[in-house]
Amino acid sequence: MQSDNAPAGAAGDSASAVRAEVAEVKARLADSQKAAEQHGATVAELTGYQRKTRVELKDLQVQLATLPHGEHPPGPRVRRRDEAAEQRAAKSHGGGGPTHPATTRLAAARAGNGAL
């Protein structure tokens, strides 16, 4: 009689193992679905930021295009270059005496426009 119970016991153990494996697969599937939802939300958020940035870029390009050509503010590299040129000019003139007319005009323009 025990030999009749052995196959039933093995079948019960096998069924329990299959149930445990199915439960594990369901849990992994749920985790995967949750990760996919989070990924989708992140992609949607980044797409929104990209759209907003494109609109801001177009607005800035329009603003830049509407500025008169001579009114573009110089960048820091240009300002440093101009300052170094003025210092060299001052040294070559010994700090006194006449200065080049362009240097005089540049100094006057800078005095009139704080951006320069």
Image: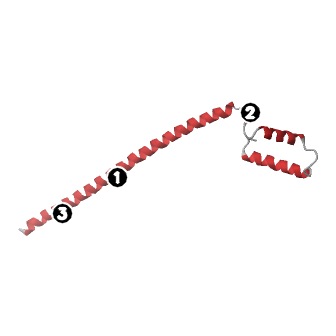
Label whose residue precedes the other's in the sequence (2 or 1): 1
Look at discs 1 and 3 and give the one toward the viewer: 1
For this rendering, which residue is in front, 8 or 89?
89
On screen, residue 4 versus residue 48, left or right, reads left
Look at discs 2 and 1 and give the one toward the viewer: 2
* Residue 116 place in picture, x, y as percent: 76, 41
- Tell me the quarter of the picture where residue 28 sits: bottom left
The residue labelled by disc 3 is 13
Instruction: Please tell me the numbered disc located at residue 31.
Output: 1
**Residue at horizontal 58%, vertical 37%?**
56
Instruction: Please tell me the numbered disc located at residue 54.
Output: none
What amino acid is found at the position of numbered circle 2 in the picture? His
| Mark-to-mark CA distance, 1 and 3 | 27 Å
Look at discs 2 and 3 and give the one toward the viewer: 2
Label whose residue precedes the other's in the sequence (2 or 3): 3
For this rendering, which residue is in front, 37 or 20?
37
| Tag 2 near tag 1, CB within 8 Å | no
Asked which secondary structure carries label 1, the reply is helix
What amino acid is found at the position of numbered circle 1 in the picture? Asp
**Residue at horizontal 79%, vertical 40%?**
111
**Residue at horizontal 19%, vertical 61%?**
14
In the displayed structure, 95 sits above or below 51; it is below
Residue at the outermost bottom position:
2
| Mark-to-mark CA distance, 2 and 3 | 84 Å
Quadrant (top left/top right/bottom left/bottom right) for the N terminus:
bottom left
How many other residues sit within 10 Å of disc 1, few (<14), some (14-19) or many (≥20)? few
Residue at the outermost right position:
97
- Tell me the quarter of the picture where residue 9 sits: bottom left
| Mark-to-mark CA distance, 2 and 1 | 58 Å
The residue labelled by disc 2 is 69
